[in-house]
Amino acid sequence: MSKTTTTTKKTTAPRAKNLVIVESPAKAKTLKKFLGSGYKIEASMGHVRDLPKSELGIFVEQDFEPKYITIRGKGDLLAKLRKEAKTAKTVYLATDPDREGEAISWHLIHALKVDPEKTARITFNEITETAVKDSIKNARPLDMKLVDAQQARRTLDRVVGYKISPLLWKKVKKGLSAGRVQSVALKIICDREEEIENFIPEEYWTIEAQVSGAAKKKFEARYHGKNDKKTKLTCKEDTDAVLADVSKSELVVKDVKKSQRQRRPQSPFTTSTLQQDAARELGFATRKTMMIAQQLYEGVEVAGHGTIGLVSYIRTDSVRISDEAFEAGKAHILENFGADFAVKTKPAVKSARRTQDAHEAIRPTYVHITPEEAMASLSKDQHKLYRLIWRRFIASLMTPAVFDTVAVKIAAGDQFFNASGSILKFEGYKKVYMNQEDKEEETNSLPEIAVGEVLKLLKITPSQHFTQPPPRYSEATLVKTLEENGVGRPSTYAPTIATITARGYVSKEQKNLHPTELGGVVNNIMAEHFDKIVDIDFTAKMEETLDAVEEGEVAWKDILRNFYYPFQETVSRAEESIGEVEIRDEETDIPCEHCGRLMVIKFGRYGRFLACPGFPDCRNAKPLLEEAGVDCPACQAKVMIKKTKKGRVYFGCEKNPECEFMSWNKPTGDKCPKCGEYLIEKGTKTKKIVCSNEKECGYRATT
C-alpha cells in the first residue's frame, strides 16, 4: 500500500512598493515611464489642506497658530493615499521644487498621518529619466525653512485679505477683495491712469532732409542742432529760423565714422520674461502662458518618445543653466549651424539683486526634440510656446549678430544734421530667434560718402509733434514693472492679474489694462487708509523678509507678530472713518426685453455682462457684446464680437437667431471683386484680406 504525501506551498506576501506622490495626473503619467514596477505613482491633485474659507483661520491669541483643514472633496482621495502609504516601503514626496511644493509635501505628511521617518523629499528641475532617478538617489528630509516661508506668505496674505475685504463689502459692495500683491498692482495701474489724465502735451518739431552725394543715391538726414550741439525745436518760429539758415548754406560732410556693432542674444526665459514675450509675440494672457507652460513641464505625449516633460521647471527668476544643458545646446548648434554660430564657453550669468536663483532658467529638456518634430504631437498653443522657449534657449548659446555701421555729420553753415546706417553682416543668434525688439531694428545702408563732400538738398520737411502720455500697462508691461520693483514672485503674477480683472477693478481693452470706476474707488480707499499695504517699497521689503525666512534668518511667526497688531489698529481706524461709497452700475441704451428698463453693466466671474436694474423683480441678463464695426453681410444689421462656451472668439449678427450669419474671421464689410462673397481678415501679425469663399474663389490681398 503506497503512501501519498501532500506538500503545502508557502505563500509570500507581496513585496512592498515605494509610493511616489506628485500633484497632477499628467506628472504621474510622465514619472511612470522612468520608474520601474517597484514604484507606485499617485497624484494629490494639488493642495490637500488649507486655511478655512469661512473664517480667518489663524489663532491670534495662540501665537498666530494656523488652522488647517482638509480641502472639501479631498476626503476620498486622502483615504486612498493613506492606504497606499501604510503599506509602502518609502513614501517619496515629489511635489514641485519650490516653497509651495515643499508646503504641499508637508501638508501631505500630516494629512496621511505617515511617519516622517518613512518619507523622503525628492525634487527635480526637469522631468527626465536622469533627473528623476538622481532625485531618488539624493532624497532628503523636508526643508522646514521652505515650508515656513510659504506659511508666512499664506498667513500674511490671509490676514490682509480677510481683514480688509469685509470692510470693502460693508462700505462699497459685496464680493470685493483686497490682497497684499493685488492692491499694489491695482495702484500701479491707477497711478498710470492718473498720469495720463494729468498729462499736458508739449510741442516739438523735427526736420528731415533728403539728400544725395556723388553716388547719386538718396538718403535721409535728421536735424541735430546748432554748432553740433543738440537743439530742441519747440515752436514753428525756431524751426523756420533753422530752415532759413539751411537754405542759405551748402551741405558739407564734416565727419564719417565707420564701425562694427554687436547685438548679443538675451538669456533664456525666466517666468516673467516668458510671460512678457508670450504676450507680445503670441498674444497670450499671463494665465494662459502659465497653464500651457505647466503642461509642457509635467509631460505631454510626443510621437516616438512617449509621455515626456518638454521644458524645465517654469516658476523661476534665474537665468542660469546647467553644464549638461549648455553642452547639449552647444552640440545642437555645432551640428545644425556650424562653429561660427556657437559660443565657446557658457555665458556668464549676472543675478539681479532680488533673484532667488533656486532653479535654472526655463529651457527645453531635450534639445534634439525640435519644435518642428514636436509639432504634430502638440496643440497649436503648446507648439507656439514650446517653439518660443526652444528658440530663446538655443539663441542664448549663439554668437552675437554683427552690424557694419556708418555715422555721418553734415553741416549747413552752423546747423548740423546726422545720418546713420547699419547693415547686418553676420546673423549670429538672429538665425534662430528674433523678438519684437529685434524685428523693429532697422537695417539701412548709406552710400559711400567722403569727408568734405558737398551734398545736394533734394527735399527738407519740417514736422510738428506733441509729446505723448505714458502708455497704459499691458499684462506684459505690468509683469515687468512688478518684477523690477520686487513685488510678488514668479508664481504670483498670473493669479494677481486674473484676480483684479475678475473683481472688475480693471478692464482689458485692446491688450491695455484700464482701471474701472470700481477699481478707482477701491484704490483710493486703500491709498488713503492702508498706505503701507499699497506702498511698493514696503511690499518689496516684505518679499525680502519672506526670503529671509527661507534662509533661516527670520522666524516666520515674527513676521506676523510685527505686522498684525499695527495693521489691526489701522483696520479699526479705517472702519470708523470710511463712509459708505455708492458705485452706480454703468447704464446702457439697451432696453430690457422683459420690462423696458435700460440695462446696466455688471461684473461676474466671467467678466462684464448686461443685467436688468429691476432685479429681483426682473432677472433678465445676457452677455455684453462688442460691435465689430461692420455690417452683417446677410442682413445689414451690426456684426458683434462673440465667444463660444469654451472662450473662442467668433463674429455673429446682432439679430441672431433670426439671422444665422457667423464667421470665425472678422468680415471687412466689402465684397469680393472676383465672386461677390464677403471678404474677411485673416492672420494676426500680417493681416490678409481673403474671400470668405476661399476654397472655391481663392481671392487674396495683403493690407
Image: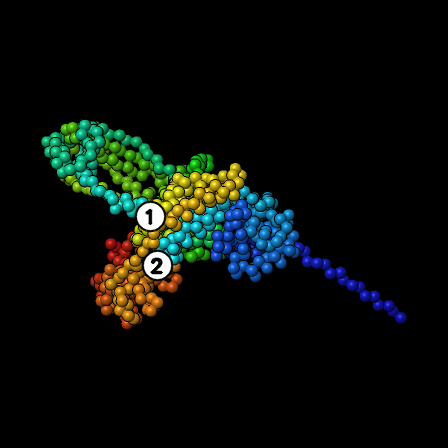
Residue 101 visible in the snapshot:
no
Give left or right: position of 136 versus 522: right
Residue 70 pos. (x, y %):
54, 56
Give left or right: position of 306 versus 168: right
Mark 1 vs mark 2, CA separation in Å: 20 Å
- Image quadrant where residue 633 sits: bottom left
Numbered label attached to residue 537: none
Residue 676 visible in the snapshot:
yes
Cβ atoms under marks 1 and 2 closer than 8 Å = no
Question: Looking at the image, which is closer to me, 321 or 184?
Answer: 184
Query: Badge 1: few (under 14), some or many (20 or more) residues near its Cα, within 10 Å?
Result: some
- Image quadrant where residue 245 sits: top left
The quarter of the picture where the N terminus appears is bottom right
Q: Is residue 289 above or below residue 239?
A: below
Q: Secondary structure at mark 1?
A: helix
Q: Residue furthest bottom?
A: 658
Q: Residue at x 25, y 35 (%)?
A: 420
Q: Residue at x 37, y 37 (%)?
A: 264
The quarter of the picture where the C terminus appears is bottom left
Counting the numbered discs, the total is 2
Q: Which residue is mark 2?
A: 603
Question: Looking at the image, which is closer to me, 275 or 218?
Answer: 275
Amino acid found under the numbered disc labelled 2 = Phe
Closer to the camera: disc 1 or disc 2?
Answer: 1
Residue 426 pos. (x, y %):
35, 38
Q: Residue at x 15, y 37 (%)?
A: 235
Q: Is residue 671 above or below residue 444?
A: below
Question: Looking at the image, which is closer to me, 672 or 105?
Answer: 105
Q: Which residue is mark 1?
A: 524
Amino acid found under the numbered disc labelled 1 = Asn
Give left or right: position of 448 versus 167: left
Question: Looking at the image, which is closer to me, 544 or 416?
Answer: 544
